[in-house]
Image (tube, rainbow, N blue to C red):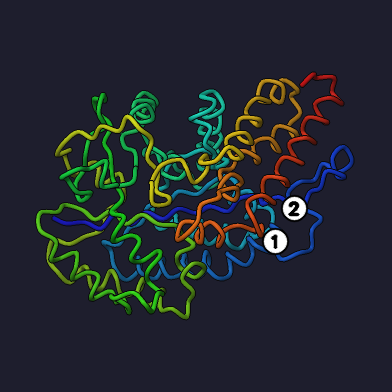
Amino acid sequence: MRSIVLYLHVHQPYRLRHYTIYDTGLDHSYFSANDDSDKNNQKLINKVAEKSYIPTNNKLIELMNRHPDFKVSLSITGTVLTQMEQWAPQALQSFRDLINTGRVEILAETYHHTLAFFYSRNEFEAQVQMHKNKIEELFGQSPQVFRNTELAYNNDLAFWAEEAGYKGILAEGWDKLLGWRNSNFVYQPAYTNNIKLLLKNYKLSDDIAFRFGDHDWAEWPLTASKFTKWLNDTPDAQLFNLFMDYETFGEHQWQESGIFNFLEDLPNQWLKQENNTFMTVSEAIDNFEPVDYIDSPETITWADTERDLSAWLGNPMQQQAITALYELESKILGTNDLGLIEDWRRLQTSDHFYYMCTKWFNDGDIHAYFSPYDTPYEAVINYMNVWHDLQFRLGEKGVGV
């Protein structure tokens, strides 16, 4: 048996509005609630819902009705769920409709899409529990498999996930991690006893997520028939872990590129061959035994050429900004001010630090594509202006900083 494990990640941050030092102490609304620009969070969530979420959910439901073996796994951050509840209820309902098919598994993660694991274990665990509660409330599922923000992974995280009761965890199938092995099998993290590890096949995943619409790519146009032939011709493989952003469909790859036609034809082409199927992440974990141990003493992620944390923490500006934020943790939580705590948690979202990246060449182009700022320096200044207002609000409560 060979399986495609299609895992899609749904996330939108609360982007900061243009916030100047003159706003500090006067205006505590950080997340463009009063901003009528194209960067307004309400406008953006509705745009992505219209272009990506709703049509993709509708297409996936069609495919499930047509192909009994077709299944999908999702992770959905708390930030995008909150925005859909607030501004795009039709998109949230489309996810409910999809999940109600019974062939969608939802994964666990941090509520606010943060790097808290590396800065505060207590905050990390609080956010994982918040996310679990939200998924149970909205969709009636209790996640069994964990994925950390940006697929950031190391041995310590795998050990934590096993202790927390998860049966599986996801990571990037990076060459330096795998060595002579490949990502088309189930593995076991080093220093664990029961938890299993699924590794993203980044070459095949990125063919869809990044190269699909590139007319200069040697394999363009990519058809489902061509793609499944690559999979069928791959020797000695149990599964193909295709992990990508949900926004691949309709947003990063526009409808005009043919991406929805590709998605529609993928199950038809793959299921033509006997013993080919689709599995959720839990089904892959339940059906295949680990073939080897994977040792990851250093942190890997699914971003940029280095596949490390440098996309978010690679320069002093990023490091100082995130350190300054977590230094406020005990004071912020000690206020018991739910609005202040929520603002602080929204500021932990990894996207804010991603916008501060100063890399060049291809990685820099990708960062610029996703950033609402003209330069990373504008991102830092804007962010730290907000941080200073957090200090002001603490001072108002008599909390020294």
Identity of the residue furthest to the right in this view: 26
The residue that appears at 52% across and 30% down in the rendered structure is: 124
- Chain-order first, disc 1 or disc 2: 2
Judging depth in this view, the residue of 182 and 141 nearest the camera is: 182
Q: Which amino acid type corresponds to the residue marked 1 in the rendered image?
A: Lys
Residue 278, by quadrant, is bottom left
Q: Which amino acid type corresponds to the residue marked 2 in the rendered image?
A: Arg
Query: Percent from the top left, x then y, of residue 326?
Result: 62, 28
CA gap, disc 1 and disc 2 = 8 Å
Judging depth in this view, the residue of 82 and 230 nearest the camera is: 230
Left of 250 or right of it: where is 112? right
* Residue linked to disc 2: 17
Look at the numbered discs 1 and 2 and tell me whether their residues touch, using CB distance below 8 Å: yes
> In terms of secondary structure, where does tag 1 sit?
loop
Local crowd size for mark 1, using a 10 Å CA cut-off: few (<14), some (14–19), many (≥20):
some
Query: Percent from the top left, x then y, of residue 21?
Result: 83, 43
Residue 103 can be seen in this image: no
Report the quarter where the N terminus lies.
bottom left
**Numbered badge on residue 39:** 1
Left of 396 or right of it: where is 288? left
> In terms of secondary structure, where does tag 2 sit?
loop
The residue that appears at 26% across and 61% down in the rendered structure is: 69
